[in-house]
Amino acid sequence: MELDTDLLSLRTFLVVCDEGSFAKAARKLWLSQPAISARIRCTDVSTNSYLNNRQPLYIVQHRSRPSGEVGEPQAYAGVGRSSIPQHDGRGMMQIIDADGHISERARGDEIRKYLPRGNARDALFPALDHLHTHFLRAPDDGSLGFGSPDAAEWVEFLDQTSIDWSVVYPTAGLAVGRIVAVDWAIVACRAYNNWLHEQYVNQTPRVKGMALLPVQDPQAAAAELQRAVKELGMLGAMLPSTGEGIKAHYGDRIYWPVYEEAEKLGCALAIHGGCHHHLGLDSFSTYYPVHALGHPFGVMIQCAAMLAHGIFERFPRLRAGFLEGGATWVPFFLDRMERSWHGHTQVDVHGEYIGPNPKEGAAQQFKRLVREGRLFVGFDIDDEGLGYAIQRGGRESFLFASDWPHEGFDAKTVRHEIDELLEREDLTDQDKEAIMASNASRFYSATPD
C-alpha cells in the first residue's frame, strides 16, 4: 500500500512538471488542485526534499527599517499572468493574513510580570484539553513543530511570503474559556493583552493584535474590550468557541454588554476554535478526527447560537468572524439550518417569531449578513470545497489564514499554498481578491460610532 501511494505521488509530480501548472495537471488527472498539492507534499516527505520549488507568482520585496517597520514596496518579481488578480495597477495583489498565531507559553516570563504579586509562578492558561498532545506521533509524520516567533521573526515571515500584514491570535490563550476562576480570567486577559501590545503590536504595524476577554464576566469583558481597542491598539477581540468558564452560548443575553461595546468601538469579534473536549469527541484515542471535527463543530455551534437568538438583529452594526473551522462547513450549515427552520418555527410568549425573519429564512439570513459585511468565515487554503462554499455563501465572507506557525508550516510552504490558490480555476479573479485581502480589510477595519 505504501509503495502504491508513493507511485501515485511520484506520477502526480511528473505530470505537474510536464504540464507546467497545478491547474493543468489537475485537469489531466481528474483531481482537484488541493489533492494535487497533497500528493506533492507526500513526495516531498518521502524523498526528504522540496522537489516542487516554485517561484511565487508575484513577490513584493519590502524595504526594512531599523525599527522593524516596513516602507513602500520597493521591487517586484514574477510573471504577468492574466488569471491572477491585479492590485493598484502595479501587478501586485495585496495579501492579508486574517489568522496567524503567536506562541505565548514559551514567553511566560515576559507575560507574568503583568500579573499581581505572588502569582508569577502559575501558568497563565490551562491546557487546551486532554486530547491535543498525548498521543504517539509517527517519526515521519512531516511535522516541523513550531517555535515562538517574535515580532522581528514575524516580519521576516511576512516578507518571505509577500503577505502585507497579519492579525495574530494566541496559542495557549485559545483555552481562555476554560478558566473558571473569574478574577484569574480578568487578570490573565489583562496580562496577555498588555504583553501582546508591548511585544508585537507596538513593534511593527504589520503585526496586529486581537485581545483576549474574560468572557466569564461579560461586564468585565466589555470593559477590557474598550481598554484593548482604545489604549492598546487592538483590532477587536477573540471569543473562545468552547470552555468550562463560558457561562452560556454566545446567543444568550448575558453577552449583550460585549456586543454593545463592540458596536460602539466599531471593532471585530472573532470566535476561534482551539479546545475540542465536550463536543462528543472526549473518548477518541486517535487525534486527527478530533482536530478535523473539533474546530468546525465549535464555531458552527456559536454561529448558530448568535443567528438563532437574534444577536445580529439586536446589534445591527456587529461584525463577527468564525475562524479556523475551514470553509466547507458553510454549505452543510446552510442546508441544515434552512431545512430545520422550516420544520420547527418557534414563537415567544407574545407570538413573535424567534430566529430569522419568516420572510427571509435561515439560509438567506446568513447570506444577507455576509453581503452586509457582518459575518465572516476563515478558510483553510487547501480546502477542496472552497469554490463551492463561495458559490453557496458568497465571496464576501471568506478570510485567508496562514495559521503560521501552527501545523508545522514554514514560509516556503505558506507561499507555495498561496500560489496554488491563485492558480485555481474554480475561483474567479474577484473571488481571489476578496478572500485574500479585501474581506479581511473590511472585517478588521475600525468604524466607531
Image (cartoon, grey):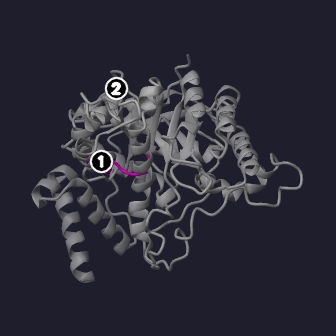
Q: Is residue 92 visible to the viewer in this orientation of the structure?
A: no
Q: Quadrant of residue 43?
A: bottom left
The C terminus lies in quadrant: top right
* Left or right: 48, with 116 as reference point: left
Specify few, some or many for label 2: CA neighbours under 10 Å numbering under 14, 14-19, or 20 or more.
few
Residue situated in front as seen by the camera: 220 or 423: 220
Residue situated in front as seen by the camera: 17 or 282: 282
Q: Which residue is mark 2?
A: 87
Q: Residue at x 58, y 53 (%)?
A: 174
Residue situated in front as seen by the camera: 383 or 275: 275
Residues drawn in magenta = 323-331
Q: Can you give x and y, in whole percent of width and height, for residue 311 in the image?
A: 45, 33
Q: Residue furthest right?
A: 117
Using the image, tell me which numbered label, if any, was put on residue 333.
1
Q: Is residue 12 above or below residue 163?
A: below
Q: Can you give x and y, in whole percent of width and height, for residue 422 in the image?
A: 28, 42
